[in-house]
Structures are given as structure tokens and as C-alpha cells.
Amino acid sequence: MSNPFAALPAVHRVLASREVADAGACYGAAVARQAARDVLAAVRARVAHGDPVPALEALTSEVRSLLERRAAVAYPEVLNATGVLIHTNLGRSPQLAVSAPGYVALEYDLTSGERGERLTPVTARLVRYFGGESATVVTNNAAALVLLLAAHAAGREVIVSRGELIEIGGAFRLPDIMAASGARLVEVGCTNRTHPDDFARAIGDNTAAILVVHRSNFALAGFVATPELKDLVDLGRRRGTPVWVDQGSGCHLDLTRYDLRHETTVQQILADGVDAVLFSGDKLLGGPQAGIVVGTHSAIAGMRHHPLRRAVRPDKNSLAVLAATLDAYLAGRPEEIPLYRLLAAPASTIRSRARRIARRLQLDRIEAGFRPSRAVIGGGTTPDQTVPSWAVTIPGGEDAADRLRRARPAVIGRVEEDLVVLDLKAIFAEQDAMLARSVATALAG
Ligand SMILES: *Cc1c(COP(=O)(O)O)cnc(C)c1O
């Protein structure tokens, strides 16, 4: 039997083909050579497993598509037509665009010319907006919880209600986080009912704190009881036990303005007298990924001096966006924040936009329609609640959804039976024309 590898073309022959040469001119000769080598290596492995040797044209088009994949934008822009405003897979909250100069006075005091503290501008704003004595910022809320526990509860006990031992998704399970930070979890109460007395009985010599956790992604209904935060704070004061709240969602303004049920805000929790409250920067704060902690001087100082703090230090871009986001709230202008612009759009306006997009698509012979829809905030913020919205519908089910995903910008909808439903609640009005163009191009031919 002849050696099948002998039939494989050499790298220079693949590179000399018209298709690869054109791509090489576009993406660079070195990049093209590497892609040709990588494809040939993969083909050699397939041939070794008994596959036939592919024709030269098949090889060159494989090289070309590899080059295109490698040249693709790492994080492409998407039009979020899912009806989920804080979509974990689409980067949670849409962010304020803050232009970043090359260098910034990140840890530098321009008045004295001396070294400054990177967090000060942001923590000053946090204290002004939320109240509390002091604040700090780390990379995300999970890190904030780990740091708080490591700083104040390593080798000690933290009391948590059995109704709040949550899993946020992925690797965030409260009992595991506690174990990783060296704290010992003491569970009290029952899944559905926990009383202040349960906490009172559990407090001992080795108790570091009571931890209250926001039920971010589920709702408890029926025969249920949860202690008032005020009562836990009173208990903590009497017994010298700090009370911490992992608020998660970072609710900070009156959600009833946006057709949602009232949710306790970070400001109210601090006013109740807790020692520390933690939340994410990219949920209801509508900012960048960050873990924010606001509380007493002693709670925050312990975190600031812990060696782990350096490992969870936020970067300059996040801090700049977070400061700008807080400035909008401090100025009383939440509508400048993209998330609240979306939330504020009334259903009647969304309906007209849906109708206009559907008409525009009909001109392109796409059988588009429009209909009412329900959107959700998502991201573990307001479980169990929806807001009224409208959607454009496109025939073609999964197949059409697949094409829309490959469009640029990509359009991400949801499939309901044989329709793609494009909810407009998380689409900015100024994106409507782009959405229509993307859909029309994706479905043409
Ligand atoms: C979302 C959430 C977290 C995790 O926050 P990240 O910023 O994603 O790390 C932790 N606790 C609660 C209650 C949450 O809702």
C-alpha cells in the first residue's frame, strides 16, 4: 500500500493557491503560513485515522475559514433581543461608555505629586450615595464575600438561615464559598421558616457574624417566615455580633417606577444599622463588574488590610466606569445609565417600535409580525417578576435564529415553536434600524 501522506500537498503549495494567497494579503503572510501548517497537521491526524486525503480545494478553504475565525472580533457586539435585561451570557448590564485615556492619575495625587490611593475617588462616591461610614471595591461580589469572611471570620462561625443557602449558578454556592474562606457555616432555622430566636440560640463565643443572603434567583412563597433585618441588627447589638447582608442585586432606587415590585435597597439596609452590605456592580447598579462593600469603619478596615485584597483589586477601567455611573445617580439622573434608559421605555413606545420594524422587514418580503411580550430583569435580581414589552416575530424557528446569531451585529432572540421572538425591551431605540438591517441581511437568500 502506498503512503497516504505522500498525497498531502506541502505548505508552500497551499500558500500559493489563489484562495489562501488572497487571505494572506488580507491577514498577513505569517498568520496565513501558521494557519496552513495547523490545518495540514489536523488533516495528517485525520488521515492517520483512516480518512481519505482531501482535495487541494478542500484544504485551502479550510485554511481560509480558519484564518477568518482567528481574525474575528474576540467579543462581538450583539443586539440583545432576548427580553432579559441583565443577561449573564451577554455581559450582564449594558455599560456607560467611558473613554479611557492612555494614562490616568490612578494612584497619584495631582495636587501634592505624591502617591494616591486608587479606590478613594470611588469609595467617596459610594459613601455619599449609599450612606455608611466606609466602602471598598473588589473584582466582583463573590470576591467581596470571600474577602469579608477571610478578614473577619477565618476559623470562626458565621450563622446563616437554611432558607438562604443559595447557589447563584456556576461555582457560586454559599456553603462552598464559606469553606473556601475558612469560615465555619452554622445553619439555623428551616428551609421555609427562620425566626430571630434561631439566631439568638446559635450565637456563641466563636461567632464572627450573622450573614443574611438575598434570595437572588428564587422566591419563597406559602408558609414562610424570615426575620426582619431590624430585629437581627438589635440582636447583634445586644450580643456584640456583627450583621452582614449579601444583597447581591444592588437594588438602590425605587423599582416601582419601572413597573416592578418594591425591593429593599442598599440604602435602607444600611439605615437599618448593619455592619456591612455587599452587592454586584453589574446587576441593578447598571455598572461594570465589581463587588462593592459599604459598612462600618471596622468592617471595611479589616478587608482593606487583608493580604487577599491585592488579589481581588479592580482594574482602572472598571473603576472609571463605576465612578461615572455613581456620578449619574448622585446627580439624580438615573436615566443616563443604559439599564435605566431601557427600563424607563414605556410599553406603548416599544409597541410602535416593534410595529415599525415589522413593517420595514415586510418590505423585504420577510413575514414579520409583532406581539406583546414579557421581559425580565434577570441576573439574579428580581426573581418571579416580569415587565410588559413588545416583540417582533420572524418565521423560521431554530434555523432563522441560527442565521440571526451569525449576523453582524448578531441578533439574539428566543425561539417559541416555529417563530423567532425578538423582544425589544433590551434594545435601545437607536439600535432599531441596525436590528432591522441585521435581520434583513441575515434572512436574505
Ligand atoms: C449575583 C450574586 C452573587 C455573585 O455576585 P458576582 O458579582 O457575580 O460575583 C453573590 N451573592 C448574591 C446574593 C448574588 O445575587
Image (cartoon, rainbow, N blue to C red):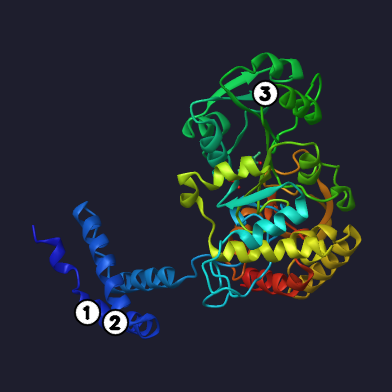
Q: Would you say the beta carbon of the disc 2 residue lies within 8 angstroms of ligand 1? A: no
Of the two numbered discs 3 and 1 on the same chain, state the one appearing first in sequence: 1
Is residue 94 shown above or below 295? below
Query: Visible in this render: residue 218?
Result: yes
Seen from the viewer's position, the closer of residues 373 and 359 is 373
Q: Would you say the beta carbon of the disc 1 residue lies within 8 angstroms of ligand 1? A: no
Residue at (78%, 24%) from the top-left corner? 227
Asked if disc 2 and disc 3 are in contact, CB closer than 8 Å, the reply is: no
Around disc 2, counting alpha carbons within 10 Å, would you say few (fewer than 14), some (14 to 19), or many (20 or more)?
few
Seen from the viewer's position, the closer of residues 193 and 294 is 294
Asked if disc 2 and disc 1 are in contact, CB closer than 8 Å, the reply is: yes
As drawn, the label of residue 17 is 2
Around disc 3, counting alpha carbons within 10 Å, would you say few (fewer than 14), some (14 to 19), or many (20 or more)?
many
Please state, as top left, top right, bottom left or bottom right, where the N terminus lies in the image: bottom left
Q: Helix, strand or loop at disc 2?
A: loop
Identified by mark 3, the residue type is Ser
Place of residue 289 in the rendered image (x, y in percent of width and height, measured from the top left): 60, 55
Asked if disc 3 and disc 1 are in contact, CB closer than 8 Å, the reply is: no
Report the side of 418 relative to 76 (left or right).
right
State how far apart marks 2 and 3 are (Cα). Answer: 68 Å
Report the side of 221 relative to 42 (left or right).
right
Place of residue 96 in the rendered image (x, y in percent of width and height, measured from the top left): 69, 67
Report the side of 146 relative to 2 (left or right).
right
As drawn, the label of residue 13 is 1
Identified by mark 2, the residue type is Ser
Residue at (22%, 79%) from the top-left corner? 13
